[in-house]
Image (tube, helix red, strand yellow):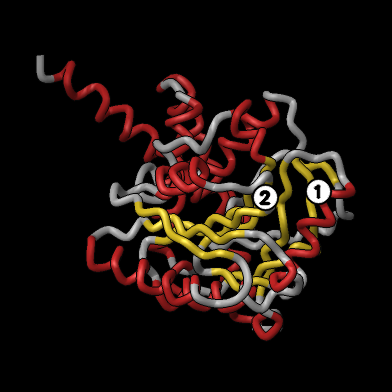
Amino acid sequence: MLSIVIATSGRLEKLGRLLEGLYQVRGWERSNHEIIIANNAPDEAGGKAVEDLVREYSRRAGPRCRQVREPVPGKCRAQNRAIRQAGGSILAFFDDDLEVDPHWLEAVLNFFSIFPHDVMQGSILMHPEDRNDARLKEALQRYRTIDFIDYGYAPGTDIRTLTGGNIAVKREVFDQAGMFNERLGPGEAGISEDVEFAKRLLRAERRIGYEPRAIVYNEVDWSRLTEKFFRFRHEQQGRSRLVYKKNSVLTIIPNLMRSIWTFGWYSLVGNERRKYRAKGRYFHYRAMLLEKFKMFKPFNAL
């Protein structure tokens, strides 16, 4: 049995689109699988709207659809609540703004029947109609703030990280490696909950495999392809990594200074990609340093 967990903050239109696609996936009509909506809407009105939408889909033929309400903000907190109530031996996780390929279910079940891996990373692709947009390609190359996963590896290739919008995990893995870190992800530090989880899996000697045929499509949100969001995303990354890496000021400051130097150099020589990489690292380490200063405030007040 497969349990699909979809964490949502109440984006009804996007969630409805994803659910509509899931009920059209090949093999649902023969399945005993379930869909669990981890309802993390920030207020009761939003939570009730998600509940009503789930009730509508629960009446359809196909997999059972139900919700788990988590009113305290935090994607990982909501996912963990859903994990505790899920019945599947394999748990798949989606973001609510994706669209699923009709062959996704077959690819996931085939992956776990053939390969020895404990965790699957599926593909996160661009919609075909977006692939020839030159302006979009340029913005994605500069900012890289929308997740797309297309490694080009063969099915079953071992990888060492995760992008949480399209993954599947054997239930037993959570018993050994623990669940998602509730201090990370949307609603908390911001991002990196998937990267941190992958690191724990590898330390527990669990294998992560790539399955390119388990496809979802990510929408292009142009508000994420801006200077403002670029800075926001890298500041989130810095604060998130500080949570689990626990960097010291003695490592943060040299990296911050190096990012300033490399940003200036690549600006001078006209290397756009490396310039933005250095710029992102600057925002990353600057956010880390500011968080460190916040930690020192109680001592400054003495």
**Would residue 59 appear left or right of 173 to someone viewing this image?**
left
Count of number-bearing discs: 2
Q: Nearer the viewer, residue 72 or 218?
A: 72
Q: Residue at x 60, y 68 (%)?
A: 140
Q: Position of residue 287 (x, y in %)?
A: 37, 40
Q: Name the element at disc 1.
A: helix
Q: Nearer the viewer, residue 60 or 246?
A: 60
Tell me how far mark 1 sits from mark 2, CA to CA.
9 Å
Q: Residue at x 54, y 73 (%)?
A: 19
Q: Residue at x 89, y 48 (%)?
A: 114
Q: Amino acid at mark 2?
A: Ala
Q: Tell me whether circle 1 and circle 2 mark residues in contact (CB < 8 Å).
A: yes
Pointer 1 residue: 112
Q: Position of residue 278 (x, y in %)?
A: 54, 47
Is residue 285 visible in the rendered image? The answer is no
Classify 220 as above or below 196.
below
Quadrant position of the C terminus in the picture:
top left
Pointer 2 residue: 168
